[in-house]
Image (tube, rainbow, N blue to C red):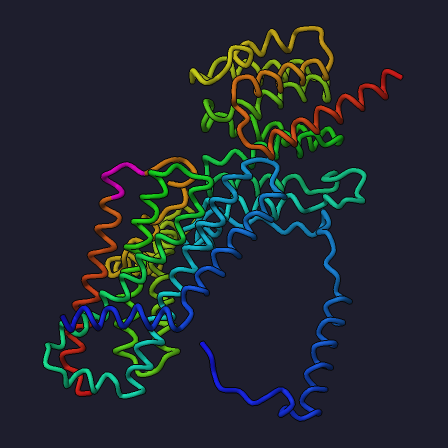
Amino acid sequence: MTRDERPLSAVPALVWSVLIVALAAQIAWRALQAPSTPQAADLPPAPSAQALRLASFGEPNALARVTMLYLQAFDSGATNAQPYRRLDYARLIEWLDAILALDPRSEYPLFAASRIYAENADAPKSRMMLEFIYREFFVDPDHRWQPLAHAALLAKHRLHDLPLARRYAAAIDRYARSPDVPLWARQMQIFILEDMNELEAARIMLGGLLASGQIRDPAEARFLAQRLKDLEARMGQRAR
Amino acid sequence: MPAAILARLALIEARRGGLGWLALLALVLGVALAGFLSQLALTESRMLQAAVVAALLRVAAVFLIAGQVVASVRREIDDKRLELSLSLPFSRSKQYLARLGGFMALGVLLAVLFAVPTLLWAQPLAVLCWAISLACELALVAAAALFFAMTLAQLVPALAATVALYLLARSISAMQAIAAGPLAPDNVLQELARYALSAVALLLPALDRITRTDWLLYGPPDGASFMLGIAGALLYAALLAAAGVFDFQRRTA
């Protein structure tokens, strides 16, 4: 690993200066090209699931998760007051679809769909995302009931569409048959018809998920707890 | 035991060449990058770390083994040390297989080292399956790199051929799926392309079925598919070793 070398003083001054100037130029050049947060319009068309699979070189699980990180960076800048609002949802759903096809057992795409993208204040976009969650639920009801349960709450409290919320709740009741699905999720229809506000419903749902050990990932628990706090703050402001 | 000496020389050369430090650096960088990415994840942060670390370390292990084997063999040929060893009183096949044994042992050491961090996120049995599978995959890569380094005259073509074979083996199933997909046009050319791909696939190992990251994420594989996968990799390593010995027997110097 070692090699014989002449001392640094043996390097001519001209070579030193060219090296230093070239390094300074490189740093200045890159500093001028500071990376910017990708904007909504920058979201490219989704590649096909097969193209993604080819690009993964046999590592679809890793690529699916890294692609989710890439996707969630669009239109989500820290200074952006309404993140994800300007995204092209048709294109976004194609991306989520392709990522799900890459790793059907990953919960990340539907988690993001229900907890981020479906919470968009733009009702038609929110509806598109809810329908995507509903469609994907039928592929694996026993493992995909959580996003649909949240979708039911969004349909009731954000879109004020009770029939839609009941349709989602009925689907969970009818098709999620695993013993891991808690009772409150099966009885989602009653839960939807109860006269409770969004905060109470969210508290019951999150409390139920935590109590049943369904949320094991620390990042997810942190994210959901923060969401609950935000909701509390919003409801508090409204009450005042 | 001259064969054991040749195998040991391969390990000593790797140690003196700083391969251990490179492997440790790859390990630290892989874990650091995965840790950074997991901070951005909203859910599945532990799975993300496991998947990224496993994918990166798998590629790093393959690159390290391929580079080490090709560089070591080319140096031996260029320094005329190979000619010297051919004059030794033991058979050419033993010489070739002894070298390969040394490189395979190096692959086992790398597989064990790279499996250790995955224990942070995955079940021990799944990690054990992954490590055994990676060791077999590295044995295959070492056999391919040794074959190409011996048969091709220069370092770059030998390394390129090894990497190309590896990448093709990992993506051939996806190519076949695309060729057979519903969007593929239904004509004679397409049909020919499909047959050509199937023919190429027959000559390649199914590397997409081994060292799978989903074992670390969703639990160990079933015994039968695991054994079939590593048996396929070892069979292909044996094929490459046989081809290499065949070529080595015909070598004039």
B83 vs B110, left or right, is left
Residue A3 forms part of the magenta stretch:
no
Q: Is residue B117 above or below residue B245?
A: above
Residue B2 x/y as whole percent: 15, 73
Image point 24% across, 61% down: which residue?
B203
Image point 20% across, 72% down: which residue?
B5
Image point 47% across, 56% down: which residue?
B27
Q: In this view, does B114 lie above or below A15?
A: above
> In this orientation, which residue lies closer to the viewer: B148 or B68?
B68
Residue B247 x/y as whole percent: 18, 77
Q: Which region of the structure is painted magenta? A: B221-226
Q: Quadrant for residue B137, please give it.
A: bottom left
| Quadrant holding the N terminus of chain B | bottom left
A152 vs B225, left or right, is right
Residue B223 forms part of the magenta stretch:
yes
> In this orientation, which residue lies closer to the viewer: B196 or B55?
B55
Image point 41% across, 35% down: which residue?
B218
- The answer to whether residue A50 is visible is yes
Name the outermost residue toward the right: A240
